[in-house]
Image (cartoon, rainbow, N blue to C red):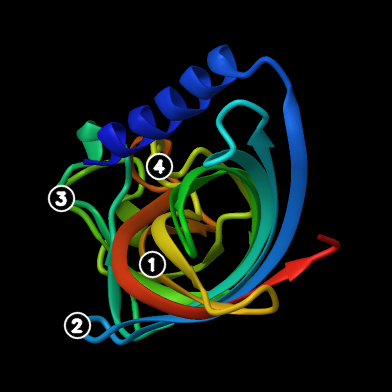
Amino acid sequence: MKHKFFSLLILCLFSASLQAQSLSRVTSGLDLGLGYQGTDKIWAPAIMYHQDLSLKHFPWMRLGWGVRTYGIYGGASQLAPKASASAGDTLSLGKISTNGISFLISASVSFGPVEIGANTDLIGLAFGTKRSALYTSASLDGEGAEFYNSYVKAGPSSLNALPLLLSNNNGQSEIYARIWFNNRFGVKLGYNFGQTSYSSVEKLDNGQTRFSTDYHYPYLGLTFPLYN
């Protein structure tokens, strides 16, 4: 699902670029909203600034980029490492709290007052409180044996890239619809595909330090144009 989503987004960007003879208009905007997922009690506020280029001969199609600041706050979570050799290993936290900022790309199409699109983070930074996490392993005598069934310190992984494609990276992607009521504001309805990653202070089995989990949730926000 994640690979298909990313491939579709890149295909839209590439196809539109080939068809564009020139770019006719730059628009900017600000989205403020909140996502929620009841199963894991995830709260996810976000603010996103975006710039979009409409194409001269295809004004209904837009390519864009932007900056997203976000927070992910939730209850008990189990995170897993990327390496298949560490399958069965988990890092369990009583709660998660991650704050981040990321650079993103987007593509959208407009139908009157409705704009439908998708975006994904490319690179980003994350930070948050270090917590005690319970480390468990399926191995009996691995590199991190001294930490089996013990608590280790872990915090949000700082440097992140392409969370849609790469495990153990903080970040988000979303599909959305902006519905404009007038030229001053509208609402944004979205569905987010995100990932939260924590890094342990200690090296664990197979040298692993980064553990992550995926989360999906609906999003509701307000959207405002800027400098248009």
Question: Which amino acid, mark 3?
Answer: Gly
Of the numbered discs 4 and 2, the one sitting upstream in the chain is 2
Q: Nearer the viewer, mark 1 or mark 4?
A: 1
Which three-letter amino acid code belongs to the residue tagged 2? Thr
Residue type at mark 1 is Gly
Q: Residue at x 32, y 47 (%)?
A: 81
- The residue to which callout 4 is attached is 164
36 displayed left or right of 109: left
**Which quarter of the figure is the N terminus placed in?**
top left
> Residue at 32% across / 74% down in the picture?
218
Element at label 2: loop
Quadrant for the C terminus in the image: bottom right
Cβ atoms at labels 1 and 2 below 8 Å apart: no
Residue 39 numbered mark, or none:
2
**Contact check, label 4 and label 3, Cβ < 8 Å:** no
Dot 1 or dot 2: first in sequence order is 2
Label 3: which secondary element: loop
Callout 2 crowding tier (Cα within 10 Å): few <14, some 14–19, many ≥20 = few
The image quarter containing residue 79 is bottom left
Q: Which mark is residue 190?
A: 1
Q: Find residue 57 and report its horizontal and vertical position in percent.
A: 60, 26
How far apart are the alpha carbons under marks 2 and 3? 22 Å
The residue located at (50%, 54%) in the rendering is 170
**Residue 9: quadrant of the picture:** top left
Q: Position of residue 112 (x, y in %)?
A: 47, 58
| Residue under the image location 22 percent in, 52 percent down | 89
Instruction: Please state which of the two labelled residues, at mark 1 or mark 3, is closer to the viewer.
Output: 1
